[in-house]
Image: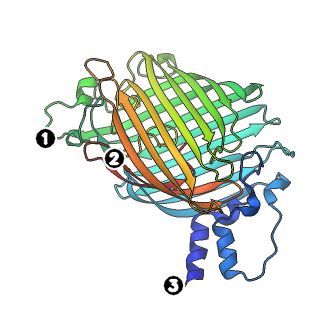
Amino acid sequence: MNRKILFVILAYLLNIPSIHLFGQVSSADSLNLTNQKDIVDYYRKVFVKEFTIQKDSCKNHSLKPFYTPMIYPGYALVTGGLIGFVSNLSFYTHHGKDAKISTILTDNVYTQYSQSINAIRSNIWLNHEKYNLLGDWRYYKFPTNTFGLGSKTTLNDANAIDYSLLRVYEVAMKQVTKNILVGVGYNLDYHFNISEVKNPIIENTDFNKYGFTKSSVSSGITLNFQFDNRLNSNNPQAGSYANLQIRDNLKILGSNNNWQSAILDMRHYIPLSVKSGNRLALWSYNVLTLGGNPPYLDLPSTGWDTFNNTARGYVEGRFQGTNLLYFEAEFRFNLMRSGFLGGVIFSNASTLTEYTSHKFERINPALGVGLRIKVNKYSNTNVAIDFSKGTGGSGGFSFGLNEMF
């Protein structure tokens, strides 16, 4: 297979031709695009001897929707190897330099461990960014492991379980002032066909102690408060983000029981050098059970944030409990002046309350390094390849698009 064919295949897999249509360029949030290069620029340099630099079509803010399908391979600790199909429907709802792009993303993934993951996520802006509609719909068939409750469990505590998940999350947000939005929503988590294969060395698993059931329903309303002054959430260069969601699950809405929780997600980005583009990214993600008893599979757990990125170095669901505190710091730097190649060094730490004492008794850290390959300089989108190492023998590679937070 010659080099040209390899580049064509890679360009298709990474969705490069269509991604250039989507991103909104802002000089305040990106490096000088004149000096930036992505994989399309290198493709043109190698294989297209003469070409005219095209005007960035994303500046036109065309209201015509762009639809792009993509087939891709990947890998994650919880799934092993995977093959997926993703489609992206992107559009603007008005013209203007301040217009934000709306997206509807679909994912269909089948994994090495016979897991089926299907999701539709939407982010739609209306009435000149005065309203924001957020959706997260999922259907999983998900054989995996649970390790029990608390931060003191080991890999030997792994207990095979299998379940199906139907998730429906919808939030409607309204701007109250610049960068601040408030909204209400509805969350449904329905786990069914739950089964477990007991670990022979464990007489009574935490799942059974907590209350094993073959199905569970959590259905509730949410109150949402958000601050976001980032200009590009794909790969923020500066700014801050904070989101507080309070969830009230109610029997009257179909829940098995009444319980309440809160999620506080905070992120801050510190530019270290305008010339180099190097920066420090900080992330705190915290989930607290405010009252009642959530079903076992709805308890706070590492790796189960919106995009499954917390606690790199550990498999998803490695630590679980009634309350979760999490912090991560990442140094992001360029390996090439063009920004085509970059790297990251990161460290994270998580702690969850123990099942018996209900106290935070142990912190589980992880360290890692990663490579970044720029696939789209307009949206500042990277391919992320990370290797991370946790405690107790945990660790491995992960692959994805965009920065982890």
Q: Earlier in the sequence, mark 3 or mark 1?
A: 3
Task: Say which element carries label 2.
Answer: loop
Residue at horizontal 37 percent and vertical 42 percent from the top? 366
Q: Earlier in the sequence, mark 1 or mark 2?
A: 2
**Circle 2 residue:** 143
Q: Earlier in the sequence, mark 3 or mark 2?
A: 3
Task: Say which element carries label 1.
Answer: loop
Q: Identify which residue, 112 or 395, lies in the foreground.
A: 395
Task: Say which element carries label 3.
Answer: loop
- Measuring from the top left, give residue 160's x and y in whole percent: 26, 43
Residue 90, above or below 317? below
**Circle 1 residue:** 200
Residue at horizontal 64 percent and vertical 51 percent from the top? 277
Amino acid type at mark 2: Pro
Mark 3 or 2: in front is: 3
Residue 112, above or below 255? below
Label 3 vs label 1: CA separation?
49 Å
For label 1, count other residues whose C-alpha is less than 10 Å away and answer few (under 14), some (14-19) or many (20+): few
Q: Which mark is drawn over residue 345?
A: none
For label 2, count other residues whose C-alpha is less than 10 Å away and answer few (under 14), some (14-19) or many (20+): some
